[in-house]
Amino acid sequence: MPMIDVYAGAGTFADRHKLAQDLAKAVMKWENVPPINLFKKNTAAFIHELASEAISNAAGGSNYVCVQVLTPINVLNREKQLDVVRELTDIVGAAAGDPTLVNRTWMLITEAAEGGWGINRHATRARKLSPQTVQS
């Protein structure tokens, strides 16, 4: 199941819950999973607010956002990766009410190795995912 983490300065987003839900739904769409409880309840986004002094580029700017997406291995081909980056970046910019934020949003897509992620107290293998492993 995918996990999305967003790191941004405090106050960047007015509605963090809606942002988290919008990001989770978008990743589900690109992973091409059905909108059933098995996936809806186990695809999550986390919005982490940081003090502005906890963020900096080399020039000293702190108005950046970092989005990390963890997906099971081989779920997103290159075309889907490009689309995920584009859509999630647009969602972040819209949620911030700042269309220029898309130019300062970093996206990191990581694939979890087989057995390298877990849920329900079990390290899971994507090929062996079952409703008993992931609560629906």
Image (cartoon, rainbow, N blue to C red):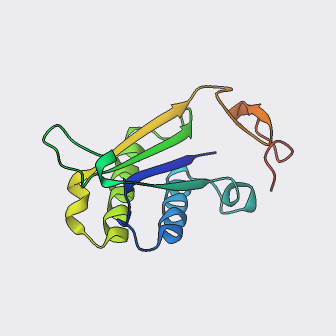
Counting from the top left corner in percent of width and height, residue 10 is at 38, 61
Residue located 68% across and 55% down the image: 39
Residue 29 in sight: yes
Q: Quadrant of the C terminus?
A: bottom right
Q: Quadrant of residue 86?
A: bottom left
Residue located 56% across and 53% down the image: 32
Q: Residue furthest right?
A: 132
Vertical placement of residue 5 versus 17, above or below? above
**For residue 17, side relative to residue 49 (left or right):** right
**For residue 12, side relative to residue 119 (left or right):** left
Q: Quadrant of residue 101?
A: bottom left
Counting from the top left corner in percent of width and height, residue 20 is at 52, 62
Camera-side residue: 24 or 100? 100
Q: Residue furthest left?
A: 59
Counting from the top left corner in percent of width and height, residue 57 is at 21, 41
Q: Quadrant of the N terminus?
A: top right
**For residue 20, side relative to residue 96 (left or right):** right
Residue located 16% across and 44% down the image: 60
Camera-side residue: 110 or 79? 110
Camera-side residue: 43 or 20? 20
Number of numbered labels in the structure image: 0
Residue located 23% across and 52% down the image: 104
Counting from the top left corner in percent of width and height, residue 69 is at 48, 44
Vertical placement of residue 59 versus 100, above or below? above
Residue 75 in sight: no
